[in-house]
Image (cartoon, grey):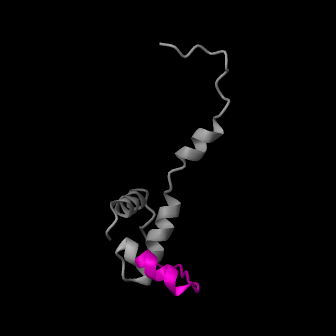
Amino acid sequence: MRSSKLRDVMVIAEKEGLLRGQRTQVVRGRMPEALVTRAKKRAGIDSDTDLIEVALANIAVADDYPDWLLSRRGAVDRETDLEF
């Protein structure tokens, strides 16, 4: 795997226990060849199974901070003195 971000995703998924247990769930689908080829090339992955695993892990451990931060808009009263 080329991308350090994807390696980090897999480490986080492992630490969260997402990669433990038997591999019993079958996930399959037909995808455009160009999409799969480019994704494999960018990720440095040859296996369809590994590509799907990395993609699912990336979604499962996605950083929700930007969405959380935007949801906080207006949470601080405009009159609050933020000067230090």
User: Residue 21's quadrant in the figure?
Assistant: bottom left
Q: Is residue 80 left or right of residue 4?
A: right
User: Residue 28's quadrant in the figure?
Assistant: bottom right
Q: Quadrant of the N terminus?
A: bottom left
Asked whether residue 29 is drawn in magenta, I would say yes
Tell me what residue is drawn at x 36 percent, y 77 percent: 45
Q: Compared to 38, does 33 lie above or below?
A: below
Tell me what residue is drawn at x 47 percent, y 65 percent: 57
Magenta part of the chain: 22-40
Q: Position of residue 10 (x, y in %)?
A: 38, 63
Tell me what residue is drawn at x 55 percent, y 16 percent: 82
Q: Position of residue 35 (x, y in %)?
A: 51, 79
Q: Position of residue 48 (x, y in %)?
A: 44, 83
Asked whether residue 26 is drawn in magenta, I would say yes
Q: Position of residue 27 (x, y in %)?
A: 55, 80
Q: Compared to 19, does 35 lie above or below?
A: below
Task: Name the residue nearer the viewer: 27 or 48.
Answer: 48
Task: Name the residue nearer the viewer: 40 or 12.
Answer: 40
